[in-house]
Amino acid sequence: MLNGMQNSVTPTHCPYCALQCGMNLTPAPDGTVEVTERADFPVNRGALCGKGRTAPAVLSSTVRLTSPLVRSEGKLVPASWDEALDRIAEGLSRTRTEHGPDACGVFGGGGLTNEKAYTLGKFARVVLGTSQIDYNGRFCMSSAAAAGTKAFGLDRGLPFPLEDIPRTGCVILVGSNLAETMPPSLRFFNELRENGGTLIVIDPRRTKTAEQADLHLAPRPGTDLALALGLLHLVVAEGRTDEEYIRERTSGWEEARAAAMAHWPEYVERITGVHVPQLREAVRMFCEPEAAMVLTARGPEQQSKGTDTVGAWINLCLATGRAGRPLSGYGCLTGQGNGQGGREHGQKADQLPGYRKLTDPAARRHVAEVWGVDPDSLPGPGRSAYELLDALGTDIRALLLMASNPVVSAPRAGHIEERIKSLDFLAVCDVVLSETAALADVVLPVTQWAEETGTMTNLEGRVLLRRQAITPPEGIRSDLDVMHELADRLGVEKGFPTDAEEVFEELRRASAGGPADYSGITYRRLVEENGVFWPCPTPAADPGDGEDESLDARDDETGVHPGTPRLFLDRFATEDGRARFVPVSHRATAEEPDDEYPVFLTTGRVVAQYQSGAQTRRVDELNAAAPGPFVELHPRLAERLGAKEGEPLAVVSRRGRAVAPARITNTIRPDTVFMPFHWYGEGRANTLTNPALDPTSRMPEFKACAVRLETVKP
Ligand SMILES: Nc1nc2c(c(=O)[nH]1)N[C@H]1C(S)=C(S)[C@@H](COP(=O)(O)OP(=O)(O)OC[C@H]3O[C@@H](n4cnc5c(=O)[nH]c(N)nc54)[C@H](O)[C@@H]3O)O[C@H]1N2
Ligand SMILES: Nc1nc2c(c(=O)[nH]1)N[C@H]1C(S)=C(S)[C@@H](COP(=O)(O)OP(=O)(O)OC[C@H]3O[C@@H](n4cnc5c(=O)[nH]c(N)nc54)[C@H](O)[C@@H]3O)O[C@H]1N2
Ligand code: SF4
Ligand SMILES: [Mo]
């Protein structure tokens, strides 16, 4: 019913980032697909970035995988589906027999639909019986998730819709370059400024986003924690705290206050390089209006202290009464297409569907019942993403990988590439032959966004339906099909449906009563209402104790829960309903510059490439716009080194050496260089990055490591 009709227009969503922009797809007679404006989706109102506009190019058989591949005499050669699936089943069951279930690893991705992420988690625990499953979201937002859970009792990236932004008074954007990473969202910030509100951007680089700001603070990489503490110090010193709010709606203020008071503005200036008058100006802009928001992205999160850093920004919101009130709050700008839903339904090492904890006996009982298994048969939590990849070839001997390209995107990627090569067996499901797929023993070609139906949960917590618009080419099967076939071959004949809606119906039941409750959501509602915000319980699933008003806004007329666009307005999701301050203090990055490696390297994105580039590097228009890696550096640093614009520059860290052309610009701090991470080969940024992990979220420090630069003869 919901599948797109051939030759007609299908409203659906972009394959890439967490905005999940709405778009219309129309198959053309020549076999191509046309993207046209879909104005009814409030997040982008028809606007798309170049990646979304050109996304159909990856549907072409000239760039995608068209057949399963198996390794034979060292080479990947086409094979039948039966042969490829048999080999995977064999590889996994042999490993399990010889080394135990935890020798089988599973690695997923935040680009997978909810249905796929859910099924992958179930596959790992029920079919393989392994605890060793995690996914690339651990590289993305898990620090913000950990901090949000600590403070608010619930992690949903944005606790309000993007549409609220134009009506608040001030937004502090911490380490987000959304003008390049989510271009259509810039509109909300432009409207904010047209309405008289202000935008503060915190980024070591004067990015396209920072250029839009009323105030740009450019701290040294890895010092956001000190910066936030310095602002809180000033808030207290200037008497700008909201004492009534602190009393009524929070706990833990005294300790957090004491920790912040140790961070004098002058001390913070020394750590961050941001001058005290700028700190004061930021505090004034943030505190004067009625309402204000802090939004973080990868800048402050991808640090070995990302959880504490986000905690400090949340503290600032709480001390000023700017959370759980209309048009105010803290939010994390999640990145991947299903970066939100992908972290809720069980592909994370410590998690069961509905954002339940794998260590919670009640959660295990509930989910085990939905799955028809004994709760005791469910393994416990496994390793986090980097730790899992680091254990390949030693404790973990076989890996099933779906929707990630770690050879390009993992920290210390040269080492991870070696670990992957040392596996006894690797199977990869992908749409293209990514650099990681090229190392596999078996590669399965799977269907893409436009060729299949499934739900995604965007950065606002809005669950939406990505609808099938075209028929997949012959010889391509969906990830759900793959898991069904593998389960069957590994002796689990039931419980792995291939129809996405059937999976979603089970996910609804599995999530019922959990923090991320989807039980009141149906495919029909998603179409009719253009998306529904979780939590959205059903009357039956709700314990009905009436305790949690803000999470339980049932429509009286119909008994149908309308979904929850805005969280925490009456109470936070903690046991006592209060938000919790965390006492945090500044600490250095895991690797500070020294004589040998005197410069900071930070990494990130450019507008025309997506992630490891596996998809976008196959699109001509995008390659023309962003053909390859580069090293961004300040003219003063360039002069000192004798580096010339466009000439190769070597960047050397304790992990390895990368070479890319110099791009000289005065928009970056002189003590810092920047590289985008979208490429493989000589210019791979992740050859250099430091896998130092945040102790709580186990997220690596992509945003700061120490390097030295050397000119290279062209
Ligand atoms: N074009 C494009 N868009 C994307 C993606 C993509 O790959 N390409 N990926 C998607 C995904 S998964 C994600 S997670 C998002 C990421 O979206 P963003 O977080 O906006 O992207 P990044 O470029 O990684 O980092 C943002 C900024 O952090 C700054 N930064 C570096 N170090 C620090 C620091 O120590 N402190 C602070 N405050 N800032 C710092 C960088 O200079 C950079 O401008 O984008 C999504 N959208
Ligand atoms: N240095 C540095 N490194 C970083 C970052 C950084 O800022 N700096 N950011 C990190 C972040 S935030 C992220 S999210 C990661 C992302 O990095 P990766 O995990 O490598 O993400 P992608 O490149 O999106 O890889 C997705 C792969 O899945 C395939 N694919 C797409 N859709 C499907 C599907 O439905 N099914 C299957 N089976 N495959 C599919 C794509 O073709 C692609 O090969 O990179 C991290 N790495
Ligand atoms: S901003 Fe993100 S969702 Fe929107 S078109 Fe671009 S990549 Fe797609
Ligand atoms: Mo991400």
Image (cartoon, helix red, strand yellow):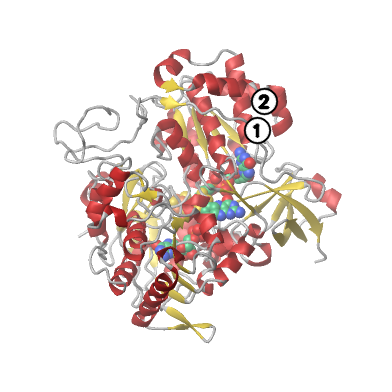
**Does residue 49 appear in the picture of this structure?**
no
Q: CA distance from mark 2 to mark 1?
A: 7 Å
Badge number at residue 217: 1
At horizontal 22% and vertical 66% (from top left) the residue drawn is: 494
- Give the vertical position of 309 relative to 68 (above or below): above
- Give the vertical position of 359 relative to 166 (above or below): below
Is the CB of mark 2 within 8 Å of ligand 1?
A: no
Judged from the image, the secondary structure of the residue bearing numbered disc 2 is helix
Judged from the image, the secondary structure of the residue bearing numbered disc 1 is strand
Front residue of 158/59: it is 158
- Give the vertical position of 105 relative to 635 (above or below): below
- Lateral position of residue 498 relative to residue 141, left or right: left
At horizontal 45% and vertical 34% (from top left) the residue drawn is: 150
Residue 480, image quadrant: bottom left
Front residue of 363/650: it is 363
- Lateral position of residue 684 relative to residue 405, left or right: right
Query: Mark 2 is on which residue type?
Result: Gln
At horizontal 52% and vertical 27% (from top left) the residue drawn is: 315
Are the two marked residues, 2 and 1, in contact with CB atoms closer than 8 angstroms? yes
Quadrant of the snapshot with the C terminus:
bottom right
Residue tagged 2 = 278
Query: Mark 1 is on which residue type?
Result: Leu
